[in-house]
Amino acid sequence: MLEVKRSEAGITIAEAARRTGVSVHTLRYYERAGLVITEVDRTQGDRRRYRQLDLDWILVCTRLRATGMPIRAIRRYAELVADGHGNEEERLEVMEDHRAEVLAKIEELRDNLELIDHKIGVYRGRLAAGDADRLWAPPTAP
C-alpha cells in the first residue's frame, strides 16, 4: 500500500496523484462521482489533504477500474463500505460478481492469445521454410 507518514496531516492533491498514479482530475472526479468512502480533509484554505485511508481506497478504486468494473458498481461498493457494518454479504456479492466477470475476460483473453500464438507460429514456420509468399493476402484489384 501507499504510505503517508503518520506525522503528516495529509498530503496535497498533487502528491496524492503522484503516489496513486492517477491524475489530479481523476482524483477530483472520484470524489464528485461518489467513489471516495470518506470526505477528504480540507485545509483552512479549502485545499484537499489526502490521508492514508484515502490513498488506500483510491488504490482499490483504480484496481477495480483496471479490471473493468463500471463506475456505477464501484460507487455502489463504496456506498456499502461507507455505510459500515451490516452489509458485508452484499459487499461480498458485488466482489464475487465482478470476480466472475474478470475470470470470463481472462478466459476470453487466453482464447485470443491462443489465436495470436498460432498466427505467430504460422508466420515463423513459413518464413523459416522460405515460402512466406504462400500466406494469405487479400486479392488485388485488376
Image: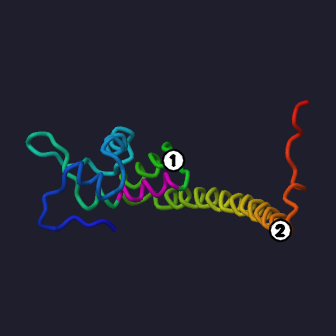
For the residue pair 73 and 63, the one nearer the viewer reads as 63
Q: Which residues are magenta?
A: 57-66
The rendered magenta stretch, by its main secondary structure, is classed as helix
Q: Secondary structure at mark 1?
A: helix
Where residue 68 sits: x, y (%)?
Answer: 55, 51
115 relative position to 141: left or right: left
Q: Quadrant of the N terminus?
A: bottom left
Query: Which residue position is annotated with label 2?
Result: 125
The residue carrying pointer 2 sits among few (fewer than 14), some (14 to 19) or many (20 or more) residues within 10 Å by Cα, namely: few
Q: Position of residue 5 (x, y in %)?
A: 18, 67
Q: Which residue type carries mark 1?
A: Ala
Q: Residue at x 47, y 47 (%)?
A: 76
* Figure check: 41 above or below 120: above
In this view, the residue in front, 122 or 128, is 128
Write down the quadrant of residue 124 in the picture. bottom right
* Secondary structure under the numbered disc 2 in the rendered image: helix
Residue 16 on image: x %, y % = 26, 54
Q: Position of residue 129 (x, y in %)?
A: 86, 68
Residue farthest to the front, as pictured: 130
Q: Residues within 10 Å of mark 1 (few under 14, many from 20)?
A: some
In three-dimensional space, the C-alpha distance between marks 2 and 1, rounded to whole angstroms, equals 46 Å
Give the mark nearer the N terminus: 2 vs 1. Answer: 1
Q: Which residue is mark 1?
A: 73
Q: Is residue 3 left or right of residue 128?
A: left
Residue type at mark 2?
Gly
- What residue do we see at 20% from left, 46% from top? 48
* Quadrant of the image occupied by residue 3: bottom left
In this figure, what is the number of numbered marks? 2
Circle nearer the viewer, 2 or 1: 2
